[in-house]
Image (cartoon, helix red, strand yellow):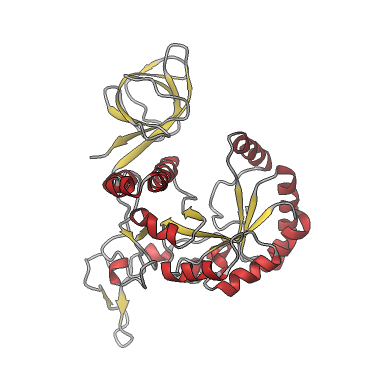
Amino acid sequence: MYGLRAKAKNFSAEDMKEGVDFAHEHGKRVFVTANITAHNKDMDGIRRYFGELKEIGPDALIISDPGVFDIAREVCPEIEIHISTQSNNVNYGTYLFWQRMGAKRVVSARELSIKEIKDIRAHIPDDLEIETFVHGAMCISYSGRCLLSNYFTGRDANLGACTHPCRWKYYIMEENRPGEYLPVEENERGTYIFNSKDLCMIEHIPDLVDAGIDSFKIEGRMKTALYVADVARTYRQAIDDYFTSPELYESRKDYYMDEISKCTYRQYTTGFFYGKPTHEGQIYDNNTYVRKYTYLGIVGGITEDGYAVLEQRNKFCVGDEVEIMKPDGSDCHVKVLAMRDDKGEAMESCPHPQQMIQVRFSETPDLMNLIRVSCE
């Protein structure tokens, strides 16, 4: 509610309680973002919100604003506080300051190199955790402090309402030639001069571990379930493989990159980790995502006669070859044998968005498996 995704379909208190309880039953932790740059008008609402969270019981709050931090310490002191990347955490003095204030974890700014993070780790206590973004969209501005959205649309990026003007098309105009708009050489539609590639560090897990990073952060809010599942699962596999055997990790790099590219993404970069990005860190000719796979739905149940119940996310048809995505990576290619609606009427395809359908596959999936299909 007070995070930097104002357009997100945020949880009600009841939904959040259900989600937190579900996660805890499965041994998982839940962190709640409250990292807006708060104005006076926000403070009373934040206090009420934290009162609700006290009853819900998430494991941590992610905060950037000192005033919001102070309210959290007062209202729900039993909940850990993590300092958001929005606080521009670029030196060990900042980390030590936040620890003295009571923070358990600090999320480093995306602008730090591996060497700088390693130096921070050397200057802070072991019990102060470092979290670092390793995958996802990169902001053109310093740790998200962008004014373009506010200027062009009146929607404040620091209140979670960014309209992403960095992804728009631009032309230039020379001041003595008003009305003459000049493309900047890339193509006839203009140049995407602010358009960053996506961060991807899956090929550099050893360097991240060696730097002393405690938690790898993946930018995934406002993304599909397919994106979150694919990226999180692949990083989990890469990390586990590395700690099992560095040789195993090295031998599977091609697999990681192939798998992580099955969700929607932009071209990849290593960001600031190995020095300041050059022009190669930008995308100049378009603002579109690369899409190799389409998300079809999540299996929400299995009927007595073996049909998978799911809410359709994209159209597919009887006879299509699709893929069942499993948590352990044992994905399988199957054929759609039959399909029916929630009233039992046979269908040849499911063209209606978010329609509840029942599907018989050539192999029965498990509950909560994802279904996807190759676009190629």
- The residue at the point 75 percent across, 57 percent down is 47
Q: Quadrant of the C terminus?
A: top left
- The residue at the point 25 percent across, 63 percent down is 285
Examine the rendering and report whether any part of residue 46 can be seen: yes
Examine the rendering and report whether any part of residue 39 can be seen: no
Relative to 22, does residue 201 appear above or below in the rendering? below
State the image quarter where residue 40 is shown: bottom right
Relative to 104, does residue 255 appear above or below in the rendering? above
- Farthest residue toward the right? 74
Q: Is residue 230 left or right of residue 374?
A: right
Number of numbered tags placed on the structure image = 0
- Farthest residue toward the bottom? 176
Relative to 164, does residue 23 appear above or below in the rendering? above
Q: Is residue 376 left or right of residue 221?
A: left
Q: Position of residue 8 (x, y in %)?
A: 54, 49
Q: Is residue 125 left or right of residue 283?
A: right
- The residue at the point 77 percent across, 55 percent down is 75
Q: Is residue 178 left or right of residue 161?
A: left
Q: Position of residue 258 (x, y in %)?
A: 28, 45
Q: Position of residue 9 (x, y in %)?
A: 55, 46
Q: Position of residue 190 (x, y in %)?
A: 27, 68
